[in-house]
Amino acid sequence: MKLLYILFISIILFSCSNQNDSVIIINVKNDLSFDRIYETVEVDVSHLNLSEKELFVFDAEKSEQITSQLVDNDLDGQIDMLLFQPKITANAEKVFDIKYSNGPQLSETYCFSRFVPERTDDYAWENNRVAFRTFGPTAQKMIEEGVKGGTLTSGIDAWLKKVEYPIINKWYKEHLSGEASYHKDNGEGLDNFHVGASRGIGGIAIKTKESYSVSKNFIDWKTITNGPIRTSFELTYGDWEANGKIISEKKIISLDYGQNLSKFLIKLKGATTISAGITLHKKEGEISENLDSGWVSYWEPHEGSALGMGIISNDGNMIGIDKYVSEEKDKSNLFAELKRTNNGFQYYAGFGWKKSGQYKSKEEWNNYLEYFAKSLKSPLQISIIEQNKEL
């Protein structure tokens, strides 16, 4: 079972004179009756001076180093956070030792995102299981000026991959050079997902009296981090109108290793609720929902296979579901209505493609969403066992 929950623990750390001394020892506890394999623990290390040193994480019992990642979340040039993914069996706990070390950690950048100016101005992101993209101002301007090849949407497009290794750079390079087309499956997967003006998988809208209002393409971007555990970035949108009010919108999107769902944090002014959407395409799929758990699912036939799409929100923030059907092209979506949290609007959205071998049925996909939601409600419990007194 591959699940994720983002956890925050604050550690007051200053300096360390011995490079191999432990910085801190922590205990991670799983209170649920299933294994937690791909949940990301976030450790605040903003008080450490890491200009010349790295932090490594060790499984204390086995004395084995496990993969970790350092992140500068606010892009001020100082490391804020250490990420790692503990493997904790059902109803169990483990101890992890965080140490200083010189030199970078050697690991594959499975979680990757970038702006793609060579293909108009996409922003694309991926991990070892799924890939996505969305579209920028040049693509919008081309549509508005009648230039062929543009795209006008704030919906989230999906790239259906079969392989664990990164494909974004490879597919763009091959497609643009004419060597291969990412619209054809050459063994790694393909882009045969139609987003159009729909919400795709996780795009937002605001409900009006008769329909839904949406933004246009993003107008600015910032890449925050890439690495073995996480990619994250920020997208800014031009102001738009809904229900007579001006809406300002930013998205902070992240995708962690082992997950099929991107995390969306929406910073938005002008509305107290939003709706995150899933395209209904040809309206041939099956809808499943569990408002108590906070998820909605759409399992549809897709180009000779099947595709599961889903949205999850935690802490009771999903307050309604709307199957909105329109005669207008690409305007039919399954919406999850969400209320604001202290930080903004937060939810997870993603997909599972049957041909990838990850989920073979609607039941398997819905089970994934249910276990994911359970983990959000019962996060891993983190406690400090020992901290270097000289720090």
Image (cartoon, rainbow, N blue to C red):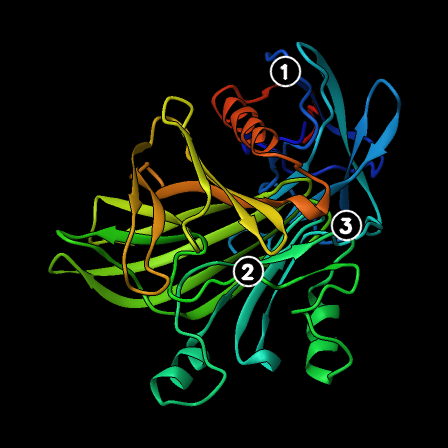
Residue 282 found in image quarter: bottom left
How far, Cα to Cα, is label 2 from label 1?
37 Å
Image point (77%, 48%), residue name: 53
Q: CA distance from mark 1 to mark 3?
A: 27 Å
Mark in the foreground, 1 or 3: 3
Q: Residues within 10 Å of mark 2 (few under 14, many from 20)?
A: some
What label does residue 193 carry, if any?
2
The answer to whether residue 49 shows anywhere in this view is no
Disc marking residue 5: none
* Residue 89, percent from left and from top: 72, 16
User: From the viewer's perspective, is residue 179 above or below residue 35?
Assistant: below
Badge 2 or badge 3: first in the primary sequence: 3
Q: Is 148 on the left or on the right of 19, as rendered?
A: left
Where, quadrant-wise, is the N terminus in this rendering?
A: top right
In the rendering, which numbered label is found on residue 164?
3
Q: Crowding at label 3, few (<14), some or many (≥20) Cα neighbours within 10 Å?
A: some
Residue located beneath label 1 in the image: 30
Q: Does 326 sit left or right of 201 as displayed?
A: left
Instruction: Find residue 30 and report its horizontal and vertical position in percent.
Output: 63, 15
Of marks 1 and 3, which one's residue comes earlier in the chain? 1
In the foreground, 384 or 165:
165
- Decide: few, some or many residues near mark 1? Use Cα within 10 Å; few <14, some 14-19, many ≥20: many
